[in-house]
Image (tube, grey):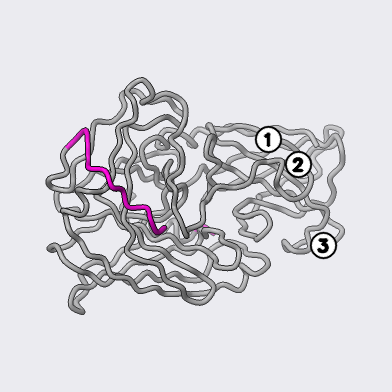
């Protein structure tokens, strides 16, 4: 699938103080396009990458219900995902920056995964780049949008980040958030990219199970979700699939989620291990079995709510103690991956829980 086709497919699916001070180590950034060798034979799970790195911030802006921060770093390799297949995107010699807009709902602080931002880059009023950045997962930033861009020369560029109507079900104050646009100026200087922090992960850790800690991003919210025990409602339990953790909880009333007041609402909150980053752009379904007979068998709807953040949910006709719950992953997270996540969250088996 081509890059444009991939983005059309995704469109159909329902930090100040972050600049590093240390110089680069371990490889050369003279051209701004080189990266170190990858871990050999990584596990099919979340693993420690070869290095960590910093980033620079172009600024922050607000419009309507949203805030947006535009961050950038040197170009990165990453892996796109189509179904359960990954494709590595290499850094091109012409790539200049890795641009990353982070958009969140101002009232709730939730980083929204369903807005498909578009970036337009201009110099002296002339458009030089227009792209829809990829939804992405990284161990330091969690969920965000980003892509490598090619700029004709060093200097200052005006960047517009625009977001459209949400692509998933929204509830509460999130339901009223509409289109927005944000204006930034990026000063592209290779000397500044050279100063972005770069730290090697110890050789003994590289490729082993685990994850580097999230980056400290002042003034910007994290995509870390609560511990399962801290989710609203009554926790059914947690299970692991493809190294992702799926936490299921139920609320007594589905009225806020398109159901009736007397119906229970089942919510499944997938997250990464170690850092508990939300995992959007999945397709989930569930079967509820009682005394050996199915009482519910249908999809779970991708939803963003103030109480549950990004999750997948459905109003059920009923839910009783002893009911058996099977959560099926019909499609794994269709977000691109940075190193350490590219082999995880792909082959995902059903999770079985008992109420």
Q: Which residue is mark 2?
A: 235
Q: Secondary structure at mark 1?
A: strand
Left or right of 295, for residue 352: left
Binning the other alpha carbons within 10 Å of mark 1 as few (below 14), some (14 to 19) or many (20 upward) gives some
Toward the bottom, the furthest residue is 125
Q: Classify 248 as above or below 209.
A: below
Q: Mark 2 or mark 3, which is nearer the start of the sequence?
A: 2
Left or right of 318, for residue 213: left
Name the foreground residue: 279 vs 86.
279
Q: Secondary structure at mark 2?
A: strand
Residue 238 image point, x, y percent: 68, 35
Q: Which residue is mark 1?
A: 238
Circle 3/circle 2 CB separation < 8 Å: no
Binning the other alpha carbons within 10 Å of mark 2 as few (below 14), some (14 to 19) or many (20 upward) gives some
Cα separation between marks 3 and 1:
26 Å
Binning the other alpha carbons within 10 Å of mark 3 as few (below 14), some (14 to 19) or many (20 upward) gives some
Q: Main secondary structure of the magenta part?
A: loop
Residue at image location 23% in from the left, 34% down from the top: 36
Q: Which residue is mark 3?
A: 260
Circle 2/circle 1 CB separation < 8 Å: yes
Toward the front, the furthest residue is 21
Q: Quadrant of residue 51?
A: top left
Cα separation between marks 3 and 2:
21 Å
Residue 14 image point, x, y percent: 54, 59
Residue 297 image point, x, y percent: 73, 45
Q: Quadrant of residue 246?
A: top right
Which segment did they paint magenta?
13-27
Cα separation between marks 2 and 1:
8 Å
Residue 265 image point, x, y percent: 76, 53
């Amino acid at each position: 699938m081509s890059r444009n086709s991939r983005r059309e497919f995704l469109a159909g699916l329902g930090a100040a103080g972050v600049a590093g001070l240390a110089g680069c180590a371990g490889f050369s950034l003279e051209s701004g396009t080189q990266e170190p060798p990858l871990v050999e034979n990584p596990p099919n799970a979340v693993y420690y990458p070869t290095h960590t790195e910093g980033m620079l911030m172009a600024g922050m802006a607000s419009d309507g219900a949203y805030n947006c921060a535009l961050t950038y770093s040197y170009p990165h390799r990453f892996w796109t995902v189509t179904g359960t297949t990954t494709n590595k995107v290499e850094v091109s010699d012409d790539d200049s920056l890795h641009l990353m807009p982070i958009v969140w709902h101002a009232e709730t602080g939730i980083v929204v995964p369903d807005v498909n931002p578009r970036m337009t880059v201009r110099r002296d009023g002339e458009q030089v780049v227009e792209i829809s950045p990829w939804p992405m997962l990284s161990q330091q930033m969690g969920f965000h949008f980003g892509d490598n861009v090619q700029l004709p020369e060093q200097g200052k560029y005006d960047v517009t980040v625009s977001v459209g109507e949400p692509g998933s079900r929204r509830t509460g104050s999130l339901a009223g958030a509409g289109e927005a646009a944000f204006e930034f100026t990026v000063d592209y200087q290779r000397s500044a990219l050279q100063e972005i922090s770069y730290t090697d992960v110890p050789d003994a850790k590289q490729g082993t199970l685990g994850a580097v800690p999230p980056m400290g991003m002042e003034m910007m919210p994290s995509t870390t979700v609560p511990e399962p025990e801290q989710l609203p409602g009554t926790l059914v339990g947690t299970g692991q699939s493809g190294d992702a953790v799926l936490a299921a909880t139920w609320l007594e009333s589905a009225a806020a989620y398109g159901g009736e007041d007397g119906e229970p609402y089942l919510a499944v909150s997938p997250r990464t291990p170690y850092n508990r980053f939300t995992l959007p752009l999945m397709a989930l379904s569930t079967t509820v079995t009682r005394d050996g007979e199915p009482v519910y068998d249908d999809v779970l709807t991708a939803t963003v709510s103030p109480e549950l953040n990004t999750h997948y949910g459905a109003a059920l006709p009923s839910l009783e103690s002893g009911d058996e719950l099977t959560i099926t992953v019909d499609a794994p997270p269709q977000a691109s991956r940075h190193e350490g996540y590219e082999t995880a969250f792909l082959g995902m088996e059903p999770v079985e829980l008992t109420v």
